[in-house]
Structure formats: C-alpha cells, structure tokens
Amino acid sequence: DQQVKQNSPSLSVQEGRISILNCDYTNSMFDYFLWYKKYPAEGPTFLISISSIKDKNEDGRFTVFLNKSAKHLSLHIVPSQPGDSAVYFCAAPGLSGNTPLVFGKGTRLSVIA
Amino acid sequence: DSGVTQTPKHLITATGQRVTLRCSPRSGDLSVYWYQQSLDQGLQFLIQYYNGEERAKGNILERFSAQQFPDLHSELNLSSLELGDSALYFCASSVQPGEGETQYFGPGTRLLVL
C-alpha cells in the first residue's frame, strides 16, 4: 500500500515558468511532509518541509502548499531554471513504526531553456 | 555536499558473492538509515540505527545485514548476491531518530551484480 503517491512520473516546463509538482497521501495522521531533490549520480537533497499546522511554507523560489482536507500537497518552483531539472521526491514520516520516512516514487522535472 | 560519505561509489560483483558498503554520517548525527533504489523504483527503506542500536527495520532481506559502530559509521552487508540486488544504495543520517527528522543523504553506492 503506497501511502505517499506522486502520480506524475515526469513533467516538462519552460524556463522561467512555474513548475508544480504534486503529491497525494492516504494517511490523515501524517503531520509533516518533506520534499527532496535528486540529481543523477547523487543522493537526494533535502529541499523544503511543511508541518500540518501550516498550509504554506516558502523558501526562495520554492513554496510548498498543503491541503489537508484533500490529503494533497504541491511544490511550486517559480521561476523554473534549467538547474532545477532533477527528480523530486515527496516524503512523510512513517507511522507504522518500521519506517522513519515514506517516500513517493518521484517526479522527474525537466526545465527546458 | 551533505556531509554524509559513502564508499565505494561503484561496485561490480558476481552472483553469490558478498559485499560491504560503508557509510560515515554527518558530524554530530547519531542516526543512520539505509535505503535501496532499484530501477524505476522509489527509495525503499531498509534499516535504521541510532547510536549503535537497531531502531527500525523496513524491507530488508535476510541476506542483508547492517551494523553501526562506536564511531557511528555504519556498514551494510549484502550476501549471496542475486541479479535483482543491483541497485543504488543510499545511506542517510540525522541528529535524532524521530519520525520526520530531516535526513541527509550520501551520494550512494551503485551496485551491479553480474
């Protein structure tokens, strides 16, 4: 059972435009979410997080929005840059006690110059 | 640079063999996590250690084992290797072991089993 889902395996966006990456979750007990970014041949890098007491968290060009009623979060990148091309993973703390973080399968973002 | 180091970067071996992957966490981090990423798969959590003790266990095969040493570095041992074990293996570390604690990942070890 996949508790964190990223239904779009890939996304292409023009440089300068907004990139919106989506993530859905099934467990309403999740109260903290993280986004990681991964370049080829490198490990995932922590990008931004959000607590369930907030509905928005912003860090420079990156903003994460949380809609608890829809069990949905999204990562907005504005403006998108070619260097943002990477795989983005959404993650949430595991609640079953046997996994500290549960990751989605990732969305590959390509920013076209 | 996350501060987490992993060696070796690449490993090629044959089926039936045994390998050891090594991880050094960020300075000050007490918790170490191991993940496997196979082709087209997300990150699968394998196992977590905190200050030398096993803390959580995920989808880790019985052929795999890990430990964390007093200096906090960790090793992941993979034995009786099969073709399907070919994957990227990541180590991550965090200060505390709590759920949701931000984890910092190493660059990974790419294992190819022939």
Image (cartoon, grey):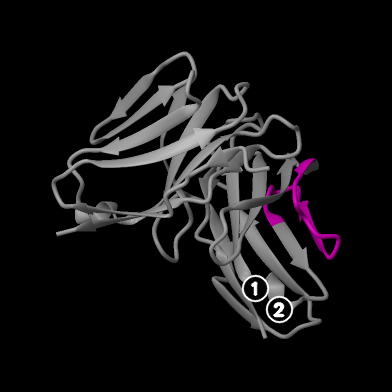
Outermost residue to the top: A53
Residues in magenta?
B55-74
Residue that badge 2 annotates: B83
Q: Nearer the viewer, residue B70 or B9?
A: B9
What chain does mark 1 sit on?
A: B
State the separation of the CA atoms marked 2 and 1. 6 Å
Q: Nearer the viewer, residue B49 or B17?
A: B17
User: Residue at horizontal 44%, vertical 25%?
Assistant: A50
Q: Nearer the viewer, residue A64 or B49?
A: A64
Q: Determine which of the numbered discs, if any, sits on residue B59 in the image.
A: none
Measuring from the top left, give residue A63's x and y in whole percent.
Answer: 31, 30
Q: Is residue B66 above or below residue B102?
A: below
Contact (CB < 8 A) between labels 2 and 1?
yes
**B70 drawn magenta:** yes
What chain does mark 2 sit on?
A: B
User: Residue at horizontal 64%, vertical 73%?
Assistant: B86
Q: Amino acid at mark 2?
A: Leu
Task: Give the left or right position of residue B30, taking residue A74 as reference.
Answer: right
**A96 drawn magenta:** no
User: Residue at horizontal 42%, vertical 16%?
Assistant: A54
Q: Is residue B29 visible?
A: no
Q: Amino acid at mark 1?
A: Ser
Q: Determine which of the numbered discs, if any, sits on residue B86 in the image.
A: 1
Quadrant, the N terminus of chain A:
top right
Q: Is residue B107 above or below residue A56?
A: below
What is the crowding at mark 2: few (fewer than 14 residues within 10 Å), some, or many (at least 20)?
few
Q: Is residue B112 visible?
A: yes
Task: Give the left or right position of residue B111, taking residue A52 as reference.
Answer: right
Measuring from the top left, give residue A68's x and y in whole percent.
Answer: 48, 20
Q: Secondary structure at mark 1?
A: loop
